[in-house]
Amino acid sequence: MLANIVIQFMNGLAGASSLFLVAAGLSIIFGVSRIVNFAHGSLYMLGIYLAYTFVEFFGRGSILGFWGAVLFGALSVGVIGAVIEIAVLRRIYRAPELFQLLATFALVLIIKDVALYIWGAEDLLGPRAPGLRGAVEILGKRFPQYDLVLIVIGPVVLGLLWLLLNRTRWGTLVRAATQDREMVGALGVNQAWLFTSVFFLGAFLAGLGGAVQLPREPAQLMLDVTTISDAFVIVVVGGMGSIGGAFVAALLIAQIKAFCIGIGDVTVFGIVFSFSKLTLVVEFIVMAIVLVVRPWGLLGKPQGSQRGASTVEPLMLPLNKGFWAITVGLLLALTALPLVGDDFLLVLFIDIAIFAVFAAALHFLMGPAGMVSFGHAAYFGLGCYGAALLFLKLKWPMELALIGSPIVAGIGALVFGWFCVRLSGVYLAMLTLAFAQIAWSVVFQWDAFTGGSNGLIGIWPSAWAKDKTIFYLLAMAICAGCVILLWRVVHAPFGYVLRAGRDSPLRVDAIGIDLRRFQWYGFALAGAVTGLAGGLYTFSKGSISPETLAIPRSVDGLVMVLLGGVQTLTGPVVGAALFTWLQDEIARNTEYWRAILGFTVLAIVLAFPAGVAGFAKIAWTRMRARPEAGGQAA
Amino acid sequence: MLKISGLNSFYGRAHILFDLALEANKGEVVVLLGRNGAGKSTTMKSIIGLVQPSAGSIEFEGKSIERQSPYRIARAGLGYVPEERRIFTDLTVMENLEVGRQPSRDGAPTWTPERLFDLFPNLGRMKDRPGGRMSGGEQQMLTIARTLMGNPRLILLDEPSEGLAPVIVEQMANTIRELKREGLAVLLSEQNLHFSEMVADRAYIVEKGRIRYSGSMADLMRDTEVRAAFLQV
């Protein structure tokens, strides 16, 4: 028994090292640039792939070749990180924070397809480390020698990072820039150089984290998303920007994971608890608990907002008659679509309608309410499964199931939201991600109720709505209703409170408004509306799978909102239409649709840093503005 | 040394500075006086490049700097001390000074931590204290010391006397006179006329983003009419 515990503990230590490297890199980059780098998992993935290639090149057998490959792999990833900073991110430091997120999403898509192009879709397993192929005996149990090396690497890197940050001029500048980068610039420090070097270091650490995993796990294309969510969890649990915190959190989570695998199934009073099933979700449970108890993470401090980086949200003016005239005209035109389009086009437009609702609800939460959700697919999925289960298990007809879907999702949002509204900023976003992941894992593993990974099939519309034209009109009606409802709410007193709370929570509290309660209701409203989109989605497809609430779905929603522009009400609808259409159009024509989508998004980010609808709005305002009013906007 | 003309700056859509013009010469202490919101801080930020002016020219030692980034302007020999002090609270006194360190330059005094501790003896007694655990007066000393580490030829001091105890204000005036003796030019913004009188050679009065008066400090002190019009609350 003791031997088992020791071995599990050692396994945890070995697993923690790699996680720590990745998370430390993410944390340093966030600290200085305030960019939440979603592409950090992709850099990790590149680390494994590049190390694999270098090992093949240097020869599998030699010790020098293996460690040379690890080092070269990590260094190459560092250089890639520096190039990304220079080519993309440097141009958008002054853009809104969320827009920088969108750029890093685009990088995730591009890097995935580049890896697919270079290394193919099959898993590549690297060689075991030469000279460390054996195992040592610990209390009568065998433990791989290589894992002992990993156990050492984590603390060594932690020590080196500490020295670098606390004992060198570079480290002093980095810590100063973490607090006030503008002031660092005013003191004569070239920030461009500082930022590039920080990206190099962060990317190098991610690459190293990947490269040292070469003998332990195969290089494959899914590593980017799984790694980034692990790294986020660790950074948030440890406290954003705290390297020591990341180390503690990596240890904690790796240990808990190792023990969940080690314990396996336990029977208590005749009920079987499967701890191994928990591994999919245990880190998110830990994160949720930590965030509720210590909102800034274990060793973190409350984040001061970066000076010189904040942007003032523009005012959302009440919708005028011209706007409504255009909206009604557009709706009438869309009603006529079945007269000219075939079924194929109708299906595309049904999808657009569904995702327009999804994006509008997410936008309501992110824009006016100021609560960014990284896990909004949870409510979409709850709506999907709510509708499907009401239809299949309770034999409710489509109409009732559709009414039920927002209620199910709304209840889910009330429960999750109660915790989420206690936080703000990145921490809130992370907690929404955690809840989405928990919901996903329940759906994914509860075979008896949700069909597990197979999902549910045979959920069809009522007889009257089976015709594509009718279903299209139904989808359009629901879409218009939901979007107009959300627009209306933004301009109702309830919306005023949310917008005021986004701009200054303190002042809202000070005039006697229980902001948290309003945010909670806002969260639930957004969840419920999203759930209705989910219900509609279920009946349009006839089947659903856990993918409806997985991370990529949440990311899609974010991309739609950001693509359209957070600052306009029409943005999410435009973004959803553009995204859905692009995805459909590109995916049909090429294997590399992700890269093309990524480059498109990147081009849009660099060309229109206010989103597509935002850009149109600015252009419209400029055109109408009198020439002498065209002063320079700082 | 520093010559500004036709300067216009905006915050978003708000027009803050209107055709502002001023000069500071070598070895001179010039004060920019004005009420809250007159545009003093925006002038300072426009000079150092934190606010991008929409029009106008800023020349420093014969070179135009109005389109350059703050770090280049600082490296040209212009030091900026912000009104809000902006100390790095997580860094120690020594580390704060390290961030400001730049190579020594011709025609400007060269500062080391030791020399600065002579100028600000308090700081020398708390070298390893984090900036966040210092009093307001100590932070004000540190922010000036940090900027001096860049060995500037001209230093911009944005409201250095603000929020300080009278005895510290007195010290601050001594410090500025000491800097002048070292050969530094100083451009400071102030609301405190008494403090300005102690240190300044020349004065400008700025109101609503426009220069409304310019002359020697002594003349301004005699001119009760101007003072009543622009400076009294």
Image (cartoon, coloured by chain):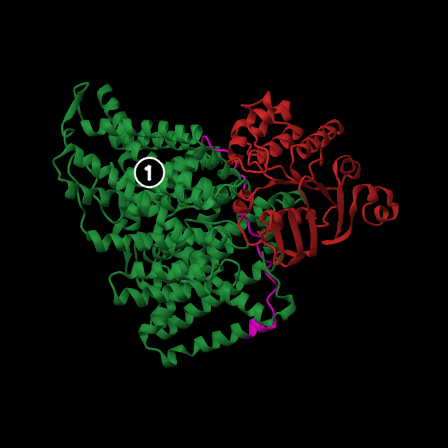
Chain colours: A green, B red
- Badge 1 is on which residue? A205
Q: Position of residue A392 (x, y in %)?
A: 32, 57
Q: Position of residue A334 (x, y in %)?
A: 44, 75
* Residue A582 falls left or right of residue B149: left
Q: Which residues are magenta?
A: A298-325
- Element type at mark 1: helix
Q: Which amino acid type corresponds to the residue marked 1 in the rendered image?
A: Leu
* Residue A399 falls left or right of residue A515: left
| Quadrant of the image occupied by residue A597 | bottom left
Residue that sits furthest to the front in the current view: B107
Residue B220 is covered by the magenta coloring:
no
Disc 1 residue crowd, few under 14, some 14–19, many 20+, Cα 10 Å: many
Task: For the N terminus of chain A, give its image quadrant.
Answer: top left
Decide which of A223, B71 is in the foreground and name it. Answer: B71
| Quadrant of the image occupied by residue B116 | top right
Q: Position of residue A280 (x, y in %)?
A: 30, 40
Does residue A362 lie above or below B27 as drawn? Answer: below
